[in-house]
Image (tube, rainbow, N blue to C red):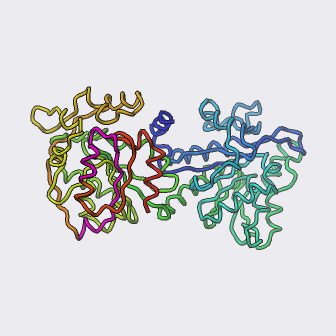
């Protein structure tokens, strides 16, 4: 699980913004044509591309779960060449990892809707038989719509809207602008194959509904409409357009979620949060900060001061529309404390994770020198000009993450980078009126050999304003070795 989480985090930030659920038809047989039918390639692959490129994890579900079937004409390698231009679908088809998703779709009844920030019902020829007048998908769609989160359907997937009702007995689409596969397009398709393909036409039925506002664009053009949190697309060429409306709506809805700003510790970078970031983002906005001279940042260590750290975090916090929960690990406890002093009205909570918790006038080195349990403090190696410090190679894993899996210990060694030394000795300026006004919480790590447990407890006692403490029986990286427990604690802090 840990390894797969790290791999997912490495894929161009996929999942950093949360999860989107795509729902597709299982395989069926058309009673009109006798063809095997299912989902249309482009109506799954094009929205999938949009969502993943926007930083969302995409799960695929169906009523029965298991393998999907793609409509023949939608296959870019089909002998008809009808969709030969569809290189996105071709790429998806040639990717074994992507095809594994459609061979093992989630069963809709096992889905926890609160794990997703949006849903998207795909079209194809199958929905006219598998999803139309299906109570399970209608209830799922209506219930999700009532949460106010983006709720989308395209092409023949919009057939579910012909019968989906709200608890008040009214059709979900009554009085709302929406679209779906147009009758003119159905006629074109019928002419193309020389027979009637569908048992009925969505547009014809939609226009019979009370207070109908069904609308269509030019035939086979990219056309999608939005009415509140309901988003619909016309046909197979509208999947990306509908998905883009979903992404725009998700951006608007950031204000509906709590925001966490996560700040890594010494000898680390923003990737430290890779084991918990995506899971946290399912029901939150998550911002990770990369401090100057850490990780990929090329700022010279001798150019960095505590003010630079503080400014970087302050800028990240100020970019958020509302208050944030500011989380600091290890060395970052010093940083987030000063940030809280400087902008207390932007921070709803401060969470220290095995972190240095200073009082006014203290610095990290003063606190570290009181730590009798730390293996890191006695194993520092400085550059010739004392501008940067690193930990002796043989001490890194035992000090930082003795209980980490071997691959993680190897990563810690591989990416260890000398730490700017000046910020470690710079003192914070904290006042009761500002820093003292921000609610504070502390997550202890009882088996810590970097910031000792006894020092952690002493700092909490000396601070005197910590509202609640938690204890995890881990090393210095609790969010790596026990990510589920860490998230349970973090999200329980209200």
Q: Is residue 271 visible?
A: no
Q: Left or right: 220 with respect to 375?
A: right
Between residues 19 and 178, which one lies in front from this camera angle? 19
Residue 441 falls within the magenta-colored stretch? yes
Q: Report x, y in % for residue 429.
A: 17, 61
Q: Is residue 36 visible?
A: yes
Quarter holding residue 422: top left
Q: Left or right: 475 with respect to 339?
A: right
Between residues 444 and 310, which one lies in front from this camera angle? 444
Q: Report x, y in % for residue 5.
A: 49, 38
Q: Left or right: 278 with respect to 158?
A: left
Q: Which residues are magenta?
A: 433-458
Q: Report x, y in % for residue 160.
A: 76, 57
Quadrant where the image shows the C terminus: bottom left
Picture residue at 9% right of the left edge, 35% below the top: 385
Q: Report x, y in % for residue 392.
A: 22, 29
Between residues 110 and 124, which one lies in front from this camera angle? 110
Picture residue at 63% right of the left edge, 42% below the top: 45
């Amino acid at each position: 699980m840990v390894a797969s989480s790290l791999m997912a985090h490495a894929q161009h930030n996929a999942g950093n913004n949360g999860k989107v659920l795509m729902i597709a038809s299982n395989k069926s047989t058309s009673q009109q044509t006798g063809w095997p039918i299912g989902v249309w390639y482009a109506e799954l692959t094009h929205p999938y591309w949009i969502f993943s490129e926007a930083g969302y994890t995409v799960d695929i579900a169906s009523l029965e779960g298991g393998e999907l079937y793609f409509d023949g004409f939608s296959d870019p390698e089909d002998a008809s060449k009808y969709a030969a231009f569809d290189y996105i679908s071709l790429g998806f088809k040639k990717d074994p990892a992507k095809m594994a998703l459609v061979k093992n779709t989630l069963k809709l009844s096992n889905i926890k809707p609160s794990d997703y920030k949006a849903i998207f019902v795909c079209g194809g020829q199958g929905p006219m038989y598998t999803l139309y007048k299906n109570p399970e998908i209608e209830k799922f769609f209506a219930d999700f719509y009532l949460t106010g989160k983006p709720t989308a359907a395209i092409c023949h997937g919009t057939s579910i809207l012909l019968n989906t009702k709200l608890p008040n007995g009214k059709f979900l689409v009554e009085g709302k602008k929406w679209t779906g596969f147009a009758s003119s397009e159905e006629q074109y398709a019928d002419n193309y194959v020389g027979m009637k393909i569908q048992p009925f036409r969505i547009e014809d039925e939609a226009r019979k509904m009370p207070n109908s506002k069904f609308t269509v664009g030019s035939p086979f053009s990219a056309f999608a409409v939005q009415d509140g949190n309901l988003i619909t697309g016309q046909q197979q060429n509208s999947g990306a357009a509908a998905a883009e409306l979903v992404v725009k709506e998700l951006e608007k809805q950031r204000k509906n979620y709590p925001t966490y700003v996560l700040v890594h510790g010494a000898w680390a970078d923003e990737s430290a949060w890779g084991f918990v970031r995506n899971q946290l983002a399912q029901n939150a906005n998550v911002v990770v900060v990369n401090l100057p001279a850490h990780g990929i940042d090329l700022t010279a260590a001798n150019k960095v001061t505590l003010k630079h750290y503080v400014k970087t975090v302050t800028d990240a916090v100020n970019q958020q529309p509302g208050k944030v929960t500011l989380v600091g690990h290890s060395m970052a406890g010093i940083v987030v404390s000063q940030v809280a002093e400087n902008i207390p009205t932007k921070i709803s909570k401060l969470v220290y994770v095995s972190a240095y918790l200073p009082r006014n006038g203290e610095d990290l080195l003063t606190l570290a020198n009181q730590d009798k349990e730390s293996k890191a403090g006695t194993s520092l190696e400085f550059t010739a000009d004392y501008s940067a410090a690193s930990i002796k190679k043989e001490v890194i894993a035992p000090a930082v993450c003795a209980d980490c899996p071997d691959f993680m210990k190897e990563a810690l060694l591989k990416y260890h980078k000398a730490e700017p030394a000046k910020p470690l000795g710079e003192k914070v300026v904290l006042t009761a009126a500002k820093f003292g006004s921000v609610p504070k919480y502390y997550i202890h790590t009882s088996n810590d050999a970097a910031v000792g447990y006894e020092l952690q407890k002493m700092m909490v006692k000396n601070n005197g304003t910590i509202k609640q403490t938690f204890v995890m029986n881990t090393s210095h990286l609790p969010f790596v070795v026990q990510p589920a427990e860490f998230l349970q604690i973090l999200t329980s802090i209200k």
